[in-house]
Image (cartoon, helix red, strand yellow):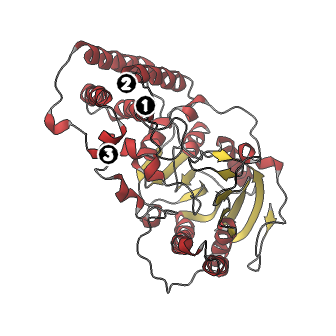
Amino acid sequence: MESISESIKNFDYIKTDEYWNFGEKDEDKMHRIHTYPAKFPSFITIKALEYAREKKVNVATVGDIFCGCGTVAYEVAKQGYDFWGCDVNPVASLIARVKSKRLEPQKLTDYFEKIIGLYTGFKMCIPIEYKKVNSRILYWFEEERIEELERLLYFIESVCGKDEDYKEFFLCAFSNILKSTSRWLTKSIKPTVDSKKITKSALYYFKRQYKKMYISNLESRITGNTVVDIKVVDSLKIQDREKIDLLVTSPPYVTSYEYADLHQLSLLWLGFTDDYREFRKDTIGSVFEKEIDTKLKLNKIGEEVLKQLNDNKESKSRSKAVRKYYLDMEKIVLNSYRLLNDGGMALFVIGNTEYKNVRIKNAEHLALAMIENGFSNVEVTKRKISNKILTPYRNSQGKFSKEKTGKKIYSEEFIVVGRK
């Protein structure tokens, strides 16, 4: 780690630190129970705990305010620490809660067999008030698959009833088969229709997904002796709560993913919304930004990037979204500081992006915001993102490509640490 000062303009001079590049062991299977874009590498949590102990941080509770699919939550609980986390996306929070609990194998088997038995044994009509279908679902799914998914979801919810932990396990399994049963282009991270796609029955995918999750749960190394609390909360609106000792989190990048778009099938089928687009409006890093006060000043790095965007005709249209992102991230830094106990540590994992040849300095802006909002001993180091080294661009379908497009994804990201 290297100390930084307010005058720093960028992190180009920082050398890659091998310590943060690789873990010592393969990831547990629980990390693969549900697809999720830009997953947080699980070993970073372990290294963050080691680094905090090395710096004499007294860690009892760890937090993550961009909880995502619960990678930090699982690793923290496995190590015997309490965890508090939040995410604005209810699909992400669902996955995270399922991942961070170890359930009774026999009870899972009993529920599964009952669900399958009812599904295959009855050709019943689903109650009208229960049906989830709307125009967006009709856009993505064939009628036969819709009928199968309705029946499957109905029996999951009716069989598990108020047994929330087990019901969420099966809802998570249901969520992860939606893209396979839909017209969504396989392996695309963007909502793209594949008109030639041929799908199998929902039951086929559900049985396969259950087997995968059952084995993962069986091999889970969570003991159940820790407190794991995961909420659906906008990190910009975190209310006063019990303090944490270590924050380990990875904020979204500006001009990055539209998570509401990516999770729209689950948002609609699980009843979290009737219109997934509502989730885009207040999301950090979203191009569907809410109205902002353009008179609010950003820190020095933010203003420099905005000036470059506005001076470039090709990139000027993105400046409003970038302004919103930077303003939001400055609030995030302040909220993070308030969450920590005195002497606590915050560790952010964040990378830079590029739009129309303008470098969007997410990491530099964050580090300066930390200094200006009370963090002391702010340090930074760099790690490689191995699967992006040779393919730093995204094509029109969102896949990594060597072909140059309007958006460059850097093959490195930064670890920025500060103390309260």
The numbered mark, 3 or 2, whose residue comes first in the sequence reads 3
The image shows residue 13, relative to residue 266, as above or below, that is: below
* x, y percent for residue 154: 25, 29
At label 3, counting other C-alpha atoms closer than 10 Å, the crowd grade (few under 14, some 14-19, many 20 or more) is some
The residue at 44%/41% (across/down) is: 193
Mark carried by residue 177: 1
Front of the two marks 3 and 2:
3
The numbered mark, 3 or 1, whose residue comes first in the sequence reads 3
Amino acid carrying mark 3 in the image:
Arg
Residue that label 2 marks: 202
The residue at 57%/43% (across/down) is: 71
351 displayed left or right of 106: right
**Quadrant location of the N terminus?**
bottom right
Mark carried by residue 136: 3
| Most foreground residue, 218 or 280 | 280
The residue at 56%/33% (across/down) is: 32
How far apart are labels 2 and 1 at the CA level?
7 Å
